[in-house]
Image: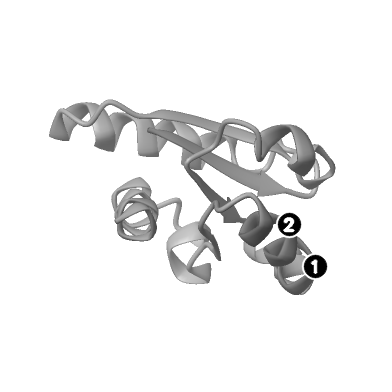
């Protein structure tokens, strides 16, 4: 399963990505988790199973959701509280729920 986190530059979510990877490993979940700039959405839609948007770019959700729907990729905005405290477990759960 490939989970892609999109944010303004692809850097602010790096700690969250690492915590999500640890959470996935501890649960025995085979997941590829990456952070990218929102500008890379076209490329990320080619092979992502789930896309999560950083709260700082939630204003782009309507525009990006149309692209994700066309590619049949579920997309949501990361829970702001979970993002703020870099709760890898909670954000991983959010991605898994989207993928079901």
User: Going by the picture, which residue comes out furthest to the left?
Assistant: 27
Q: What residue is at 79 percent from the left and 67 percent from the top? A: 60
Q: Nearer the viewer, residue 18 or 57?
A: 57
Q: At 15% from the left edge and 35% from the top edge, which residue is drawn?
A: 27
Which x, y percent locates residue 56?
Answer: 72, 63
Q: What residue is shown at x 31% (from left), y 51% (from top)?
A: 96
Q: From this viewpoint, is residue 82 visible?
A: yes
Residue 28 falls in which quadrant of the image?
top left
Q: Quadrant of residue 100?
A: bottom left
Helix, strand or loop status at disc 1: helix
Percent across and percent down for residue 3 are: 47, 39
Asked if one can make out residue 54 in the rendered structure from this viewpoint, the answer is no
Numbered label attached to residue 67: 2
Q: Residue 54 at x, y = what percent?
A: 63, 57
Local SS, label 2: helix
Front-most of residues 55 and 40 = 40
- In space, the residues marked 1 and 2 are separated at their CA atoms by 7 Å
Position of residue 28 in the picture relative to residue 91 (left or right): left
According to the picture, the residue beneath numbered tag 1 turns out to be 63
Asked if labels 2 and 1 touch by Cβ distance under 8 angstroms, the answer is yes
């Amino acid at each position: 399963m490939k989970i892609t986190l999109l944010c303004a530059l692809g850097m602010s979510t790096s700690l969250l990505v690492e915590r999500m990877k640890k959470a996935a490993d501890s649960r025995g979940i085979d997941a590829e988790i990456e952070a990218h700039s929102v500008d890379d959405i076209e490329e990320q839609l080619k092979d992502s199973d789930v896309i999560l948007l950083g709260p700082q770019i939630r204003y782009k959700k309507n525009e990006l959701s149309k692209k994700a729907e066309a590619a049949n990729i579920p997309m949501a905005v990361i829970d702001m509280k979970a993002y703020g405290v870099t709760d890898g477990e909670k954000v991983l759960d959010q991605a898994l729920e989207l993928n079901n």
